[in-house]
Amino acid sequence: MSYDFVLRSCDLNKLNSMTKYPSIPTYHALGDRGALLEETVIFDGEVILTEKVDGTNSRIILLPDGNFVLGSREELLFAKGDLIGNPALGIVDSLKGVASCLPQSQGCITVAYLELYGGKITSASKQYTSEQRVGWRLFDVAVLTDIETLFDKSTKQLSAWRDNGGQMFLDEAQLSKTAEDYGFELTPRLATVAALPTSIQEAHEFLKSILPKTNVALDEGANGRGEGIVARTNSRSAIAKLRFEDYERHAQRRNQ
């Protein structure tokens, strides 16, 4: 028998915890005071490189009872049918209409993770727009099954489950198909490579060559500096981020 999910009677704290996006590790491990270490995330097989957009992490949570919930990285902000939503970061205003057009999740919870950027969302918004335009890009989708078992866990257990890879994310082909079905644009796919450079300096040079400017500027007046890249295997079994800020800070420390 399938679990009879009803949004209005579910534990929202647990729903929030099980659908949060896990932290992506840096490709080179972070040491004391932000210094980079030579230790890297290990990739087994080809590596897909996508642009990391500097905005705010947003969630569209599609539920099996036909409802949806919008969330920021940390909080739930709005549910279908609410008269008042949390205005934080403009997520509800930007995504409420989008979410209302998406299909119902059948027998599971589907979470679309988007980067909402531009406007006045972050200090980096000027890199993407000079006219305070707002955009969003899909970067991951998780599908949560066995819902009853998840809701039987405590929020502490759910946090540990999430942080230890409990969520099931779509692979690259599935993610591309879902983006097409939803009418969403993915974060830009930059290249697929056999391997990443392992030294800190070579990785920094590689980052500069692969992302000389952002690919998601919203108008011609944007400053155009990209934040960095996300590297992942096709199955998403390994994932890491490479940010200009981290490598520039490391280079400055080394030259002091």
Image (cartoon, helix red, strand yellow):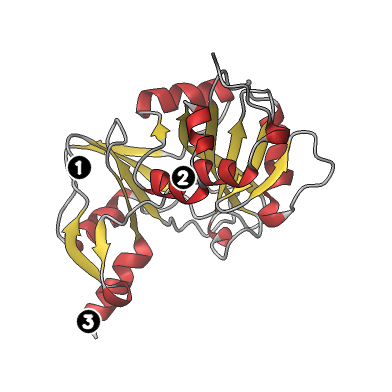
Residue 224 horizontal side relative to residue 11, left or right: left
**Secondary structure at numbered mark 3:** helix
Q: Nearer the viewer, residue 252 or 239?
A: 239
Residue that badge 1 annotates: 43
Going 22% across and 81% down the picture, which residue do you hit?
255
Q: Quadrant of residue 243?
A: bottom left
Query: Residue 121: image x %, image y %?
Result: 62, 58
Residue that badge 2 annotates: 158
| Label 3–label 2 contact, CB within 8 A | no
Query: Residue 63: image x %, image y %?
Result: 62, 28
Q: Mark 2: give few (<14), some (14-19) or many (20+) Cα within 10 Å.
A: many
Query: Residue 84: image x %, image y %?
Result: 82, 46
Sequence order check, earlier mark of 1 and 3 = 1
Going 58% across and 25% down the picture, which residue do you hit?
183
Q: Is residue 132 visible?
A: no
**Numbered tag placed on residue 255 in the rendering:** 3
Residue 157 horizontal side relative to residue 105, left or right: left
| Amino acid type at image mark 1 | Phe
- Nearest to viewer (mark 1 / mark 3): 1
